[in-house]
Image: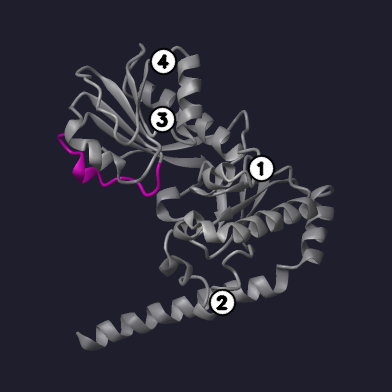
Amino acid sequence: MQKIKRGGFMKKNFVLHIRRLAVLFFDFLFDHNWFYRLLGWMNYRFFEIRTVFLMYPEQRKYALAFVYPSRLPKVKWNPFLAGFFVQNGKLGLMFAISATPDDFRNPANEDGLRSMVKRMEEIRQLVGAPRKTFAGILPGVLYAKRIVRVAPEAELTVEGILIAVDLIKKKEKIYVNVPIIALGGGGFIGRRLVKKLQNKGEQVIVVDKGDPWPDVSEVAIVINMTLKGALLEYLDKMNTEMIVVNEVYPPPNPGNFAGRVRSLYHIKGAKAFALPPFPHAYKGGIPLCAAFFHDQIDILVDKLL
């Protein structure tokens, strides 16, 4: 047993070093302005780069899966090229930093945030991409601090959710308007989604932190676009006529919802090929915040329960 455990540990450690070395080598070769200028020249002649996308680890340990500890400070606010994706025949470049959500929320790091956005804008111009986008909570943080003035991630996420809700309604054979409970409806994404839903004539009930749960006993759709733990926080208030739609990463554990709700869905993102691929929850796709709108965009929705 000891040998098996030791062998498994050694294999895992070997894979970890290979991944870190590959990222380091890739960064050494290509993370230079001359390379981005070359991509910009090729962009106008051979292919179309639609976006540059920045992602980050939720926790420091996830960053250590790709970079050595000694390198973390260098890439904390300095984006490095991490891969690419192809969506609807167009190209997107993926970049990464090692800063985490705790770093974004710390007021002392505003200069770091500004330098990161400045570098992403410089790269965007060099490669000739029409836009830059940011993962997770970054768009809301940057927008609130007035570091950015536009938030294309929010608009695409909203459009993706609207498409997903229509798909889910068809699967559930719902042909009339039913109440939609928007968890986080007063937030950065939520406000925009609620407005779009209301413009479509939907009956929307906003539930933010501290708001009472609505008295709804008939069929209703619950959309979670806030924190990953929000669904569990309100689970005991739901009923077996409710259809839960989650847009937040990671997807919820269906075991917690069995026998408590009618159905549970998770919006995976937009269909695309990515290298390296995104985590399993995004298998076959990319996060909505990374995607660009296309009239044939394919939104991936998993039925978990």
- Which quadrant of the rendered structure holds the C terminus? top left
Magenta residues span 248-260
The kind of residue tagged 4 is Glu
- Which quadrant of the rendered structure holds the N terminus? bottom left
Q: Horizontal placement of 286 versus 79: left or right?
A: left
Q: Circle 3 is placed at which residue position? A: 185
- Tell me the mark number nearer the camera, choosing from 1 and 2: 2
Q: What element carries label 4?
A: loop
The kind of residue tagged 1 is Gly
Q: Residue 202 carries which label?
A: 4
Q: Earlier in the sequence, mark 2 or mark 4?
A: 2
> Residue 293's x, y, as percent?
61, 34
Asked whether 261 or 111 is in front, the reply is: 111
Q: Is mark 3 on a helix, strand or loop?
A: loop
| Residue for point 57% across, 33% down | 155
Q: Horizontal placement of 255 versus 6: left or right?
A: left
Dot 2: few (<14), some (14–19), or many (≥20) neighbours within 10 Å? few
Q: Residue 71 carries which label?
A: 2
- Whether pointer 2 and pointer 4 mark residues with C-beta atoms closer than 8 Å, the reply is no
Q: Circle 1 is placed at which residue position? A: 89
Instruction: Please tell me in which quadrant of the rendered image residue 181 appears.
Output: top left
| Residue for point 36% across, 13% down | 177
Location of residue 132 with respect to 278 vertically, above or below:
above
Q: Is mark 2 on a helix, strand or loop?
A: helix
